[in-house]
């Protein structure tokens, strides 16, 4: 009985809806989200090709990294509560278990792996099919689920170069992407009887090419800080994934197109101290050009690295606190993070608390 309930819930999540009010991101990095999403002027690791490719120039020669396996799972508190409740039920009717959660978003995001090679001025990454899921239950005449499904995969590479003794960094990346997406609604009868849903039955597929441009500039030391500013233009082509292949010729609607936007950021870095190797503060305004109020686009964050193997971070993402920590030992890196995502038009109107874990195996 529990197996039937869990199967129903998981199938809902894996045929899920991306909220119309949630900004569409191909990938959310554990480190950026832990520090409030304020990463435009930081961007000095493998996350650069998603946040600001100019940051590849800030990776010092000899300090690159190769990751062969780095699964990441993110889940919101509503999904955790549903799973916990289902495990304790004996009822055979999944509607009874799901009804208390009508009106709530149940989010589950799974990235099986994104192997990458990153070094000074260069990154190459392969994103395996990554699901960004959010199931919304509602009651019309009876309980129903509004579900869209979105899955991304692709090959990405980025290049950067430094000028003026690397005070100015310019970078660009190109992404060859495959997106599968579609829409489906399930009524109470379908929710009760279905065991699982085949992705191919509700989704169309499309291929698209897109890219980002970015810049970083570091000023001379001011008081105790070394300030930097960053700018990025994301999804320049605003690709609609209009190139199709295979037997499925369903055209993806414009709601699944990538959105072109502008990001502005600043970073203030403290010089290395006796007990930490890096301590930074960052402030971003991102998704400029997309819908939503100003404060929905504001991100604040801080990060401190202690003894070169333990990272601690916190911040504010769209008005909600964030927290993250990293344990980096030879071959294995563990990242935990939590953040709040705004699902409404303005910051503070409809927050969604999410928790994530990533394990990275590499060197």
Image: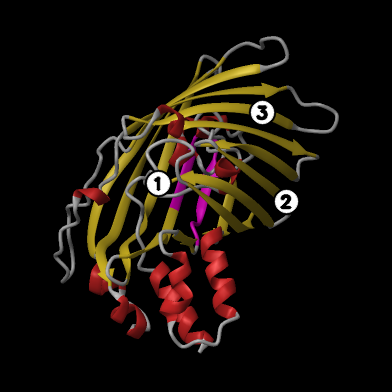
- Return the x and y of residue 299 as percentages of the image width and height: 52, 32
Residue 124 falls inside the magenta stretch: yes
Label 2 to label 3: alpha-carbon separation: 18 Å
Residue 214 falls inside the magenta stretch: no
Residue at numbered disc 2: 327
Work out whether mark 1 precedes mark 3 in sequence or the reverse, and give the earlier one.
1
- Rendered position, 282 above or below 135: above
Q: Provide the secondary structure element on which disc 3 rests.
A: strand
Q: Are marks 1 and 3 in contact (CB under 8 Å)?
A: no
Question: Can residue 214 be seen?
Answer: yes
Q: Are marks 2 and 1 in contact (CB under 8 Å)?
A: no
Residue at numbered disc 1: 25
Q: Are marks 2 and 3 in contact (CB under 8 Å)?
A: no
Q: Mark 1 Cα within 10 Å, few/some/many (few <14, many 20+)?
A: few
Q: Mark 3 Cα within 10 Å, few/some/many (few <14, many 20+)?
A: some
Work out whether mark 2 precedes mark 3 in sequence or the reverse, and give the earlier one.
3
Residue at numbered disc 3: 280
């Amino acid at each position: 009985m529990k197996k039937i309930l869990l199967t129903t819930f998981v199938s809902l999540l894996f045929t899920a809806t991306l909220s119309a009010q949630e900004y569409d991101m191909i990938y959310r990095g554990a480190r950026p989200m832990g520090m409030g999403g304020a990463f435009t002027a930081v961007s000095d690791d493998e996350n650069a090709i998603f946040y600001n490719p100019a940051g590849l120039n800030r990776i010092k020669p000899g300090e690159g990294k190769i990751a062969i396996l780095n699964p990441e799972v993110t889940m919101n508190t509503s999904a955790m509560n549903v799973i916990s409740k289902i495990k304790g039920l004996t009822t055979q009717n999944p509607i009874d278990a799901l009804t208390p959660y009508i009106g709530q978003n149940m989010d589950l995001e799974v990235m099986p792996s994104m192997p990458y090679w990153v070094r000074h001025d260069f990154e190459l990454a392969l994103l395996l099919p990554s699901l960004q899921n959010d199931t919304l239950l509602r009651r019309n005449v009876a309980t129903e689920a509004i579900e869209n499904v979105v899955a991304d995969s692709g090959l990405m590479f980025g290049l950067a170069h430094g000028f003026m003794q690397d005070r100015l960094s310019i970078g660009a990346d190109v992404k060859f992407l495959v997106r599968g997406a579609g829409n489906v609604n399930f009524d109470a009868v379908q929710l009760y009887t279905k065991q699982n849903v085949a992705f191919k039955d509700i989704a169309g597929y499309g291929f698209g090419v897109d890219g980002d441009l970015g810049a970083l500039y570091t000023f001379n030391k001011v008081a105790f800080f070394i300030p930097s500013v960053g700018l990025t233009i994301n999804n320049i082509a605003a690709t609609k994934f209009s190139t199709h292949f295979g037997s499925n010729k369903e055209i993806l609607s414009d709601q699944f197109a990538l959105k072109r936007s502008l990001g502005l950021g600043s970073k203030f870095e403290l010089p290395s101290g006796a007990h930490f190797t890096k301590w930074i503060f960052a402030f971003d305004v991102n998704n400029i050009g997309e819908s939503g109020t100003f404060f929905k686009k504001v991100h604040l964050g801080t990060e401190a690295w202690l003894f070169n193997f333990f990272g601690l971070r916190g911040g504010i993402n769209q008005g909600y606190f964030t927290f993250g920590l990293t344990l980096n030992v030879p071959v294995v890196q563990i990242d935990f993070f939590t953040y709040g995502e705004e699902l409404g038009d303005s910051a503070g109107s409809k927050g969604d608390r999410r928790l994530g874990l990533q394990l990275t195996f590499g060197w």
